[in-house]
Amino acid sequence: MISENTGSAVKYAFERREKEKLNMMVYNMGGSSTKVSIVSLEGTDATHFGKNVTKQKIDVLGESWDTSLGAYELDLCLADMIATRFDTMSKKESVKAMPKPMLRTIREAKKFKEILSANRVTMASVEELSYGIDFSKKFERNDFEKDCGHLFDRVVKPVEDVLKKAGMEKSEIDLIEVIGGGSRIPKVQEQIKNYMGKEVSMHLNGDDSMALGSSLIAANLTTTFRVLVPEVNDGPNYRTDIEINGLSDSDDFYKSTNLMKEKQRFGHKKLINLKHTKDIKARLTIPATEHNSRNGDYWVDYEVKGVSQIIENPKTVNYTNPTISLGFTMNHIGIPTLNKAE
């Protein structure tokens, strides 16, 4: 229903009282992926239960992601460092080919990574890692950052992408909020800070803000709750195309066009008019997104029948230039629905 970053932005806006416009970047490195969003917040005058209040409006300007960069990848990298040093010490067959010892090593590596996020040095110890040999060695944060540099070098790429998608410059970003466990790693914060040229903030608890923001959006979609919920303009990160053909095999009518553009806001309505006098079928296609291409395209099929009967009806037979009007609405699960055919 809503992306994690947008949920966090809604939580932030819910507690904001200022009217000034604020451009905020939300950098979210979770366990398995990294997502970056740019949202614009601005307060407007509103009335709530007879009181004059400031209601926030949120515009989601751009989103980008790296679905293979997360805290778990860093755990694997640190575990590989431990295994490499253990192999040097044991001088036996590499422990990297042994599933059980490596699972234990990955589990322990997560703890060492958290310690290195707060301290520059830690003693990494794994009892009887393999061959009955204990592993114990001092690790420095600099070693971790150097050996896993290929991962840390990817931290900034989603930031570059989201600025391009939003059509904004670094100087236009007023606030950078980092959320997610991976974002607590000093090197991640340093990379973002150096690229953007400004400090990063950690005002939001990732899981808490995502959940509360989502619940506020849900409340806004109902008439049951009367909560002063921020107004959100957001939409899916993909375009939807439409192909229209004649329903019968003998009808060679064909039309194709873009139905909804990328980031088209939820609730947006689109009308398509066709000069045709026979039944038709329409296919809505959502192209496979860059981060989910293995599933291929998604589509929804509609059949619009009864056109011929209306055209042949004595009451309408003399009408000139008959038109089929198809009305679509971008619903809140990101798939446009055909809700009117006239």
Image (tube, rainbow, N blue to C red):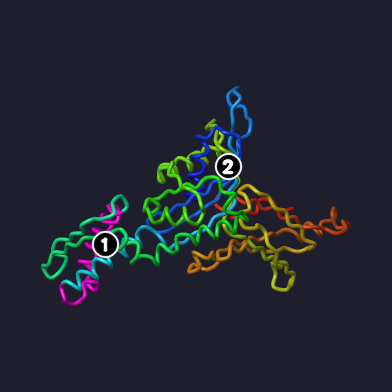
For disc 1, the neighbor class at 10 Å (few under 14, some 14 to 19, many from 20) is many
Say whether residue 146 is left or right of residue 164.
left
Examine the residues drawn in magenta and state their main secondary structure. Answer: helix
Q: Which residues are magenta?
A: 90-116
Q: Quadrant of residue 326?
A: bottom right
Seen at 70% across and 67% down, the residue is 245
- The magenta stretch spans residue 93: yes
Q: Position of residue 2 (x, y in %)?
A: 51, 48
The amino acid type of the residue labelled 1 equals Ile
Q: Nearer the viewer, residue 318 or 95?
A: 95
Q: Which residue is mark 1?
A: 106
Is residue 157 on the magenta stretch?
A: no
Real-space Cα separation, disc 2 to disc 1, in angstroms: 41 Å
Q: Position of residue 309 (x, y in %)?
A: 77, 59
**Contact, mark 2 vs mark 1 (Cβ under 8 Å):** no
The kind of residue tagged 2 is Leu
User: Is any part of residue 142 visible from this angle?
Assistant: yes
The residue at which mark 2 appears reads as 22
Query: Is residue 205 shown left or right of residue 157?
Result: left
Front one among 278 and 172: 172
Q: Secondary structure at mark 2?
A: strand
Looking at the image, is 132 positioned above or below residue 50? Answer: below
**x, y (%) of residue 30?**
40, 54
- Confirm whether residue 1 shows in the render: no
